[in-house]
Image (tube, rainbow, N blue to C red):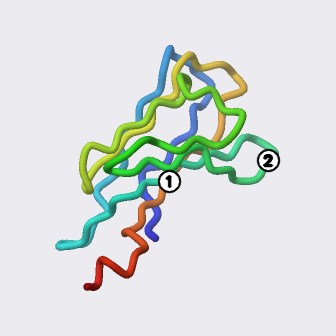
């Protein structure tokens, strides 16, 4: 699993939404089909928000408003997280990690 380099904090200025596209982190010839998005709010530990697969439906953590955190994962080389309708409580550190499929069928 690799850590995306382009993490951000919402800072003191708020806009209607923040949109992040991760930095290019892929090794040549490597395909990452799963992207995990996390956030750490002030005074709290890191928590997963959503798992975004290249194919299939995103898997959100319980009790999260899905419409607030839309994600895209159009291919193995990219993915985005958008935080909509920002409020002061959204201030924190957001980052992603990617992984390859975990299946024995890949090695056949």
Nearer to me, 14 or 81: 81
In the picture as drawn, the residue positioned furthest to the bottom comes out as: 108
Residue 23 percent across, percent down from the top left: 33, 52
x and y percent of residue 15 in the render?
Answer: 51, 16
Question: Furthest-right residue in view?
Answer: 43
Q: Tell me what residue is drawn at x 47 percent, y 27 percent.
A: 18
In primary-sequence order, the first of circles 2 and 1 is 1
| Element carrying mark 2 | loop
Q: Are marks 2 and 1 in contact (CB under 8 Å)?
A: no
Residue beneath label 2, please?
A: 44
Question: In percent of the image, x 58 and y 41: which residue is there?
Answer: 60
Q: Position of residue 10 (x, y in %)?
A: 57, 32
| Above-or-below relation of 59 to 66 | below
Tag count: 2
Circle 1: element type:
strand
The residue lying toward the viewer, choosing from 108 and 69, is 108
The circle drawn on residue 1 is none
Crowd rating for badge 2 (residues with CA inside 10 Å; few <14, some 14–19, many 20+)? few
- For residue 36, which numbered disc appears in the image? 1
| Quadrant of the rendering where the C terminus is positioned | bottom left
Say above or below: 83 vs 7.
Answer: above
* 45 sits left or right of 38 in the view: right
Task: Bin the neighbour count of mark 1 within 10 Å (Cα to Cα): few under 14, some 14-19, many 20 and up.
Answer: many
């Amino acid at each position: 699993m690799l850590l995306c380099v382009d993490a951000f904090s919402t800072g003191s200025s708020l806009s209607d939404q923040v949109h992040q596209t991760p930095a290019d982190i892929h090794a040549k010839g490597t395909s990452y089909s799963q992207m995990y998005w996390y956030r750490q709010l002030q005074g709290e530990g890191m928590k997963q928000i959503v798992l975004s697969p290249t194919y299939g439906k995103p898997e959100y953590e319980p009790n999260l408003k899905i419409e607030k955190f839309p994600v895209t994962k159009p291919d193995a080389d990219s993915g985005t997280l958008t935080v909509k309708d920002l409020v002061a409580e959204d201030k924190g550190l957001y980052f992603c990690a990617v992984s390859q499929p975990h299946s024995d069928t890949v090695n056949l």
